[in-house]
Image (cartoon, helix red, strand yellow):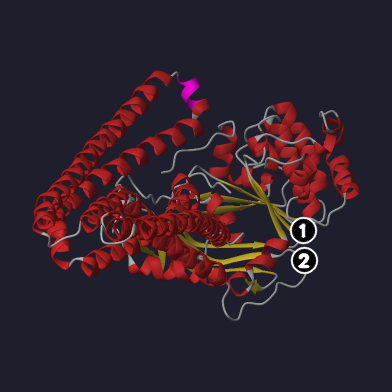
Amino acid sequence: MSWGGLGQGSSGNLPGILEIRRLRGRLSLVLEDVEFGKVYDSKVVFRLLGYVRPHLKLTIFSLLTMLLYIATQISVPLLVGLAMNQFIQNADLPMVERLSGLDQIGIIFLCVAVANLVGNYLHLIGLAKVNQAILRKLRVEMHAHLQKMSTMFYDHNEVGRLMSRVQNDAHALQEFMMILAVGMAEIVSLGGIIALMLFWDFQLALIAFSVIPVFAVIMILWQGRARRSFMRIRYAISGVNASLQENISGVRVTQSMNRQTINLNQFDQLNKEHLDANVSATKLTAGLMPSVEILTAIAFGLLVVVGGRMEQEGSLELGTMVGFALYVQRFFEPIRALVMQYAMMQRAMTAGMRIFELLDVEPELVDSPTAVDLPPIDGGVELKGVSFHYVPSVEVLKDVSVDIQPGQRVAIVGPTGAGKTTIVALVARFYDVTGGAILIDGHDIREIKRSTLANQMSMVLQEPFLFSSSVADNIRFSHRDVTDAKIEEASKALGLHEFITRLPEGYETILHERGSNLSLGQRQLIAFARALVADPKILILDEATANVDSYTENVIQKALKELLRGRTAIIIAHRLSTIMDADKIIVMSQGKVVESGRHNELMAEEGLYAKLYAMNFQDLPVE
C-alpha cells in the first residue's frame, strides 16, 4: 500500500553505507549499496551451510565426484612421466615389454579420461541441483520476510533496492555456490599438484615454486585497487537503476512537464559513469592476467634450464622433467581461475551479507506474546489521547481523541499535512501509536493479532492497486473461498457487472500491471467490490473519489451507499460534497482535532470547516 507523504525518512543518496537507525526503540534497516566486500566471509559461509544441510547427501556425492574429477586431472602428467621413464626412455627393457607397457598406459589413459568425464558431469549436475534448491529457499524466505515488514520499513527503504536483494543478490549468491564449488576444486587440485611435485622431485619442485612470492606481492598490490574499482562499478549501477526506476514510475509527470530530454541527459551521464567504471576495472583485471602468464613462462623457463642440465648430468630422468613441465602449466591454471573468480567472490560474499542482513531485520510491528484473536466486532473505534511521530522531533498527531460508534460514517477533513491519513494508518495498525491507545470495540489493537484485525477491516485507497491477474481474482483477492456467484453478486450490487461483462473475457480478463487497461473509475469500483466481498465491519476510504471526474464520482457514490450499509466507515475526503451527510465530521489541523460535528453544525460555527467549504473544497495551507 502506498501512503503518499507518510514516511519522511529516507535512505538518502549516500551509496555504500549501511546504517541501522533506531526508530521508536526498534531497529530499521537502511539498505546500503556496497557490493564488493571480503573474498571470504566465514559468517556468510556458515549460514549458507545451514541451507546445504537438507541436501547433505547430494552435496557429499557431488564432492566425492569432484575429487574423482580432480584425481584424474592431476594424474595425467604423472602417467606421461611414468610412460617416458619406464618404457620410452628405458633402453634396458626388452622391446616387447616396452610396447606392452605402453599399451597398458594407453588403457589407463582411456579409463582416466572416462572417469574424468563422468566425475565432472556428476559433480556439476549435483551442485547445480543443490544450488537451485538453496536459491529457491532463499528467495521464498526473503519474500515471506518482506511480507511481514511494517509500513515504517518501506518508508525507509526503496523498493528498487529491496527487489535488488531478492533478485540480484540472490542470483549473485547462486554464482557464489558454483564459484565456491569450483574454487574448492581448484584449491584441492592445486594442493594435489604441489604434493605430487614435492613427492616426485623435491629440488625441482622448489625451483618451479620460486615465482610464488612474486605472485603473492602482485596479488596484495592488486587486491586493494581491485576492491575500490569494483565498488565504483556498484555505485554507478546503483545510480543507473535508481534513475531508471524513478523515470519509469514518474513517466506521466515527465511527459506532462516535457522533461524527457533532461531526464535522458541525466540518465546518459549516469550510464557514462558506469561505463567508465567498468572500463577501469577491465583494465585492472586485464593487467593482472599477463602477470600470471609471465610468471608461468618464467617458472617454465627455470624448469627447462635447470632441469635440462640435471638431465644431461644424469641426475634427472627426461620423463620426470616432462611431467614437471606439464605440472607447472597445470599449477598456474587453478591460480588463473581463482584470480578470474576474485571479483565474483567479493560480489557473492557481499550479496550473502546483504541477504542475511535483510533476513535479520526484525519487523517493526509484531504480535505481543499475550496477543489474542479479535472476536467478531460491532465496529466501534476509539482513539484515546493518541500521539504519533515518524521522527522523534516532529509530532504528527498530538493528543487526538475520537469516538466512533458502530455503524457510523465518520469523515476526516482538514488541510494538507493535518494528519488525516496518519489516523487511518494507525487504525489499520500500519504503525503503532507513540502515545495513547486505539481501541476496537474496547480492545487495544496492540493486544490483538494483526491477522485477525485485518480480517474485519478493509481499506480503499485513492489509487487502488490491482494485480496482474483476472478481474475475478482481483475481487476475490485474499478470500480464496469466495465463489464466482458471490463475486458477481457483489459486482451487480455496486453497478459494475455490466462493464465487466463487456471486457474481452469478462470476469476472467487478465488485467495489465496495476490494472492499467482500465480507467481509474473502473479500478476504483473493482476495489470497492473487493472490499464488499471481504465483508468487513470497519471500512476505511482514503480519498477514494479524489481523482475521478464528476460522472464517475456519481457512479462511485451510488456504489458507496451499498458498500457502506451496515458498516463503520472512516472516510478521508477533499471533496466535501461527498461527506455532507456523514454522521460525524472530524476537522484536523496541525495534528489536532479542532472541530467535530455534522455538516450543518460545523457550517454554523463558521470555523475551519466552513472556510474549507467556502473555498470550493480546496486545502488550506498549514499555518
Task: Find numbered disc 1 in the image and state the secondary structure of the residue it sits on.
Answer: loop
| Residue at x-position 55% and y-position 56% | 125
Q: Can residue 29 be seen?
A: no
Most frequent secondary structure within the magenta stretch = helix
Q: Residues within 10 Å of mark 2 (few under 14, many from 20)?
A: some
Q: Which mark is residue 558?
A: none
Q: Is residue 108 left or right of residue 17?
A: right
Q: Is 263 on the left or on the right of 131, as rendered?
A: left
User: The residue under label 2 is which amino acid type?
Assistant: Asp
Task: Work out whether residue 548 or residue 251 is closer to the camera in this orientation and state it.
Answer: 251
Q: Nearer the viewer, mark 1 or mark 2?
A: 2
The quadrant in which residue 55 appears is bottom right
Q: Is residue 370 left or right of residue 63?
A: right
Residue 13 screen position, x and y as percent: 32, 44
Name the residue nearer the viewer: 558 or 350.
350
Residue under pointer 1? 407
Q: Amino acid at mark 1?
A: Gly
- Give the alpha-carbon distance from disc 1 to disc 2, as whole Å: 8 Å
Q: Is residue 324 above or below residue 556?
A: below
| Residue 256 among magenta residues | yes
Say which of 189 and 477 sits in front.
189
User: What residue range appears in magenta?
Assistant: 253-257
Q: For label 1, count other residues whose C-alpha is less than 10 Å away and answer few (under 14), some (14-19) or many (20+).
A: some
Whether pointer 1 and pointer 2 mark residues with C-beta atoms closer than 8 Å, the reply is: yes
Q: Toward the viewer: 367 or 537?
A: 367
- Mark yes or no: residue 216 visible: yes
Give the quarter of the figure containing the C terminus. top left
Query: Does 68 sit left or right of 557 as displayed?
Result: left
Q: On the image, numbered disc 2 is attached to which residue?
A: 378
